[in-house]
Amino acid sequence: MNFANPKYNLLNGNPCNSTFNTDEYLECINHALKRDMPNKNEILYNYGLTFIGQKGDKDLVSALAKFYSEKIGCFVNEKNIFCTLGASNGIYLASALLLNTGDNILCEVPTFFGAIEIFKSLKLSIFPALRDNKGCFNFDDIEESIKKNNIKAFYLITNYTNPSGANLNLTDRNKLYQIANKYKVYIISDDIYELLYYDEKDREIPLFYCSDKVVESKGNKEILSSYDNDSSPYIISINSFNKVIFPAINFGFILAHSDVLKEIGNKQLIYAVGIRNSFQNSLVHSALELGFIDKWAEFQRSFLRKNIYYAIEKLSKLEDIELFIPKGGYFIYFKLKDSIDHNKFATEQTQNNLLLLPSKYLIFPEALDLLKDHQKYYRICLAYYEFDVIVKAVDVLVDYISICKIR
């Protein structure tokens, strides 16, 4: 694929620069300096360049637990939070420190290509778990694969998956919860898009909380508000603010059983991987205290809704593609029908000022047999540009689809 610079790069999975408020970011820096550092000169020597044990980490975890308890409507216990350097770092830590070289891991298909690269780098053997066009799994196939292949972990994006934006329903979350405990398999739930829903009614209880008791109670608020975060040692939630605050701030966290976090923490110190930067943590702490994380998340949701809904309106009118309607996240996923010249569509994008992501980059080789028509699928990112640019980019895409139609 030609990755030359087109006018409309719909491949990039980053947020738009204009969605960030520089003045508020600077306010976070000043707030952190005043709160945590009596001597501001120490930032460049003692504070900014040192890692664990600095003042602020405990307070950050407390603020984080309070924030997420309010945002997801479930009790988050401080002892069940482990700070990381972003979602990818969380995936790496959970995989590297809980699994061993040569272990077998189940991975959703299609999925985040960064996770695939992490598993490959750790020399894990990857087995596919196909999600259909509605984002659902065949749980009989999953259980069979776990038993047949001695699976040790299962990675998936539970909320607003990459690339389709599908949201796993409550019943299926509970099935995964049951499977994890039945077979003692770690479920690594990538929840980075948790806060980027388009409509409040489409939200679901996080997989971490989807025990039988919770689901049978239909999400009883009293049960969720006192939920024992040590209920299962096999459910691991990976989260991050990278999609709602500056991507340069690599901050995330793992929500898991306290014994699991102790194991990760002990091994992290031994191997010195993913050690947290205290000043960076201080900035996130200030953003939480000042109410900016909540404000920025709402702004991102509003920004995404406008871009996504416009693209859906335009693309849903086309007869030559099958469009998968997302419930949240950054992306729209579609499939070209046989009326389109697939080879032309793949090779002439940049000549038409477009760059889209083919699904082959979201699939690992072991899964190709499950998706024999993968060359027909494409992902576009609607988060990187402001609305006026998205309008032009979508119009160009609509025209390009028409150009590639077999006459």
Image (tube, rainbow, N blue to C red):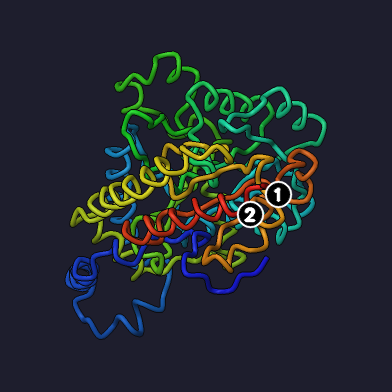
Using the image, determine if residue 192 lies above or below residue 184. below
Q: Residue furthest right?
A: 148
Relative to 41, say whether 303 is above or below: above
Residue 375 disc label: 1
Label 1 sits on what residue type?
Answer: Gln
> Camera-side residue: 375 or 28?
375
x 28%, y 47%: residue: 302
Viewer-nearest residue: 138 or 348: 348
How far across and down, in percent of the image, does residue 157 sit? 54, 42
Callout 2 crowding tier (Cα within 10 Å): few <14, some 14–19, many ≥20: some
Q: Which of the two discs, 2 and 1, labels the residue nearer the N terminus?
A: 2
Q: Position of residue 374 (x, y in %)?
A: 70, 45
Residue 57 visible in the shown view: yes
* Disc 1: CA contacts within 10 A as few (<14), some (14-19) or many (>=20): some
Dot 2 amino acid type: Pro
Disc 2, disc 1: CB below 8 Å? Answer: yes
What residue occupies the far front of the structure in this picture? Answer: 407
27 to 207, vertically: above or below: below
Which residue sits at x=19%, y=76%? 38
Instruction: Tell me the quarter of the picture where residue 283 sits.
Output: bottom left
Disc 1 secondary structure class: helix
Q: Quadrant of residue 222?
A: top left
Where does label 2 land, which residue? 358
* Total marks in image: 2
The image shows residue 140 at horizontal and vertical percentages of 71, 22
Residue 151 vertical position relative to residue 244 in the rendered view, above or below: above
Q: For mark 2, give the secondary structure.
A: strand
